[in-house]
Image: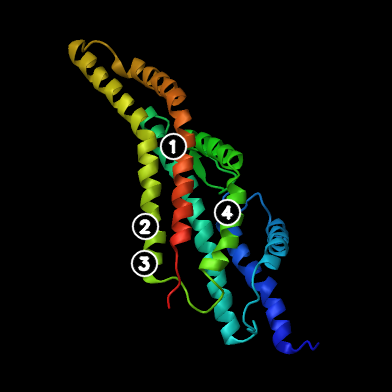
Amino acid sequence: MTFNYDDFLRLLGLYFWPFVRITGMLMLMPLFSASYVSVNIRLMLAVFITLAVAPSLPLPAPIDPFTWHGVLLIVQQFGIGLAIGLIFAVIFQAFVIAGHLISMAMGLAMATMVDPSTGVNTPIIGRYFTIVATLLFLLMNGHVLIFKMVLDSFQTLPVGLHFFDSMSLKQIYGFGSTMFESGVLLALPLVTALLLVNISFGVVARAAPALNIFAVGFPITLLAGLIMLIFITPLLLPTMQNLMVAAHDLIESLALSK
């Protein structure tokens, strides 16, 4: 039995190409892409996932990663991983958008706090939705589902120089519309209820001009918004489920150019 250079490249590629794809995915994957997760932890996690995934994959073609062919292949694998991570990052942004809309309707647009995962200020309601969505994501084993889809992607998106075709690229950036759609639908009941409250304030102010509507309007609006949050929170689970199913179907439909 002989072990030549081509065999070495196949064995190297069996672990190296999945490592590159998984590393790209962890750059944008929810939870693991947060600023409080250090780069060293991400690299260690990518190594462990690769060691678990690689033995179940077929041997790739012998491609030297130190050639132009190999560099282009690294870019391709990293780009596929980024696309998978981006699709799931969009899911969490839907809840942030819903939180923005609700915060503006409740008069809490200026009440912000630093999101430790991104390091930017987000409305307090958006942060609340993000925490609940994260717990639901872990409860549904969403992180396990992502790792499984990465493993399955090596069957539908094999290692090679071909990148996503035009239809797949349209589906990826078109998935952003799902983010806005889900965020608006989630916030719509509460925003509609607060709109009715503001209309009633206008009627009261018209009927009794002497009443200082601004003194009582904000507390009532805030109280009505908090009450509506009790009814909105159970909708987070079906919203998360629908988004996870949509992301799974999208990744399964991605294809490479011929």
Q: Determine whether 178 is above or below 253 in the image.
A: above
Q: Amino acid at mark 2?
A: Gly
On screen, 257 above or below 188? below
- Mark 1 vs mark 2, foreground winner is 2
Q: Is any atom of residue 37 visible in this view? A: yes
Q: Amino acid at mark 4?
A: Ile
Residue 6 is tagged as: none
Instruction: State if disc 2 and disc 1 touch (CB < 8 Å).
Output: no
Res. 57 image quadrant: bottom right
Provide the secondary structure element on which disc 2 rests.
Answer: helix
Q: Nearer the viewer, residue 124 or 88?
A: 88
Could you tell me which residue is drawn at 47 percent across and 48 percent down?
Answer: 245
Label 3: few (<14), some (14–19) or many (≥20) C-alpha neighbours in 10 Å: few
Percent coordinates x, y for residue 210 in the rendering = 23, 10
For label 2, the residue is 174
Label 1 and label 2: CA atoms lie apart by: 22 Å
**Residue identifier under label 4:** 146
Asked if disc 2 and disc 4 are in contact, CB closer than 8 Å, the reply is: no
Query: Whole-percent x and y of residue 163?
Result: 47, 74
Q: Which mark is residue 167?
A: 3
* Alpha carbon separation for disc pair 4 and 3: 22 Å
Q: Contact, CB < 8 Å: mark 4 with mark 3?
A: no
Q: Residue furthest front?
A: 1
Q: Is residue 162 above or below residue 126?
A: below
Q: Amino acid at mark 3?
A: Met
Type of amino acid under label 1: Gly
Report the disc number at residue 99. Answer: 1
Q: What secondary structure is found at the residue carrying circle 4?
A: helix
Q: Is disc 4 in contact with disc 1, using a CB cutoff of under 8 Å?
A: no
Q: Earlier in the sequence, mark 1 or mark 2?
A: 1
The quarter of the image holding the C terminus is bottom left
